[in-house]
Image: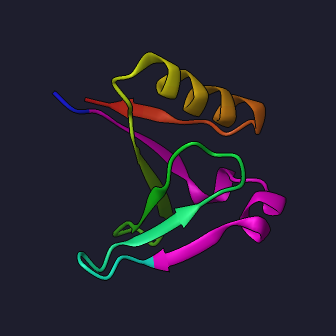
Amino acid sequence: MSAHAYIQYADIPQPLIDASRQRVDEATQAKLVAFPDCPLTGHIDVLSNGSIQIEFPWPRARELRHALDDWMNYHGINYTVVM
C-alpha cells in the first residue's frame, strides 16, 4: 500500500514559495517543486476548481516520514495523508 501527503499551495508561506525550485520532469511531463530543506520533491496538481495542491509520497521509512512531517509542522503547513 502506498500513501501520499497533500498540501494546498495557498497554505505555503511566501518565503518558501519564493525560494522554491520548479521544473518539469522530461520523462513524465510532471510539474515538480522542491522547497528549501524539504526532504522530498512534490508534484504540482491543478485541481478542477482551480486550486493548486502539492502531492508528496508519504515515506514508509520512519526517519524520512518524520522529517517530512517535521518540515511541514515547522512551517505551519497543514497536510492530509491519504492511503
Q: How many marks?
A: 0
Quarter occupied by the N terminus: top left
Instruction: Give the image location of residue 40, x and y in percent.
Output: 51, 47
First to last magenta residue range: 3-23
At 28% across and 33% down in the image, what residue appears? 3
Q: Decide if residue 9 is on the left or right side of residue 54.
A: right
At 80% across and 62% down in the image, what residue appears? 14
Quarter occupied by the C terminus: top left
Q: Residue furthest left?
A: 1
Instruction: Give the image location of residue 22, x and y in percent.
Output: 56, 74
Location of residue 17 by image quarter: bottom right
Instruction: Decide: is 62 above or below 49.
Output: above
Location of residue 67 by image quarter: top right
Give whichever of 66, 83 is nearer the camera. 66
Instruction: Decide: is 46 above or below 74.
Output: below
| In magenta segment, residue 24 | no
At 45% across and 17% down in the image, what residue appears? 62
| In magenta segment, residue 21 | yes
